[in-house]
Image (tube, helix red, strand yellow):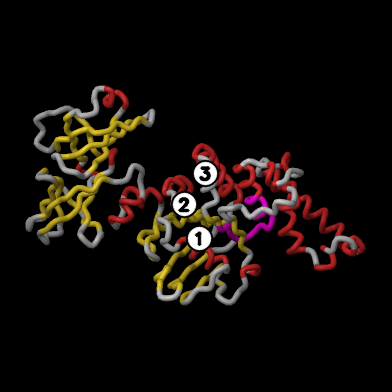
Amino acid sequence: MADIKLSDIQKSYGDIPVLKGVDLQIADGEFLTLVGPSGCGKSTLLRIIAGLEALDQGEVLIGGRSMNDVRASQRDLAMVFQSYALYPHLSVQQNMETPLRLRDMSFWERFPVLGHLFPSRRLKTVSIQEIVNETATTLKIDHLLERKPGQLSGGQRQRVALGRAMVRKPVAFLMDEPLSNLDAALRVHMRAELAELHRSLKTTFIYVTHDQAEALTMSDRMAVMMEGNVLQFGTPDDIYKDPRDKRVAAFVGSPKMNFLPGEIDVQGRVSAYGIPIHKSNHTEKGPIEIGVRPEHLEVGPVGRNANQWPFTVTHKENLGSDFFLHGHINGSDQRIVARATPEKAQQISIGAEIKVQANPAMTMAFAADNRRIELVEG
């Protein structure tokens, strides 16, 4: 195992810049997720780490050693692809044995007929089979070793792809959206299994996904990427609760954060739709955007509280333990989402005129250039 350091990684395809100077420090044994929308450069960055893509500028260090001129096969990394890339004509056992045979056996030892003439081949075969059996038991696929990929479910194929990577005991696992081909229920199950596997192996995982739910639930730290840049790097809790950029705030969280048109006056007073929110040390007067997550909008009946916004309910989304009320504030065209308990939501019908109030302590403000404006009490 070893730490991985990326310094000023830049990559362009023709005149189109894909990575614009990425710097990351990945600790030994850490589960790091690269998350962002399609086209942000996360898969390209993973392929550069793996050695499958050449960088234009910068340096990849693994265990303090530069990998820029080291071939992919010599980097001791294991990659799990979105498509699993299993050999359809080989059994599960043969698929898992293949990387070890290629690594540990000579050309002549691998030869179908002549290979049996080498005494060392038998010893290596026994060792390879022991490693495969141990890995299969860990992944609970030992009963599938004789099957071929076409006889397996999506979740089973995903485990086999992981097993084929695990047998090599690499310094790090690189995973490019490995759960995207699974159905929703199996994705949730496999998220937990991957996190448990990481804890048991204590090996570095670098995981690419566009699904922020995967990043939030599995990662030790996550890097939110957009347009070839890392906008924010930190723990899932920090990024969810303390986004430093409006684009990060909008991307991380489901349902996404609500953004309301706001104002800031020369005294630093912040308001949205005429309702005072907070104060700020930022005293440049002008329009800003107020960010408030659905769970931080308190839903209530029409009352006399001056800090409430009138809210017209246009849709109710039932998720069992929670209801999400969709609607409009002050008659605007902008759709707003507020969370309500099932008990409260039962009393509210579509078309109802209610009121909502933002929790000032959890409200955020963003300037026109997307940077976060700090709010203060007052």
Q: Position of residue 131 (x, y in %)?
A: 74, 51
Between 173 and 256, the one nearer to me in the picture: 256
Q: Amino acid at mark 1?
A: Ala
Work out whether residue 56 or residue 104 is closer to the camera in this orientation and state it: 56
The magenta stretch is: 161-174
Residue highlighted by disc 1? 27
Count of labels in the image: 3
Which residue is at 54% across, 43% downward? Answer: 182
Q: Are marks 1 and 2 in contact (CB under 8 Å)?
A: yes
Q: Secondary structure at mark 3?
A: helix
- Residue underneath mark 3: 191
Question: Residue 347: x percent and y percent?
Answer: 24, 22
Name the amino acid, label 3: Arg
Q: Nearer the viewer, residue 110 or 174?
A: 110
Front disc: 3 or 1: 3
For marks 1 and 2, give the CA distance.
Answer: 10 Å
Q: Is residue 346 left or right of residue 50?
A: left
Residue holding disc 2: 220
Amino acid type, mark 2: Asp
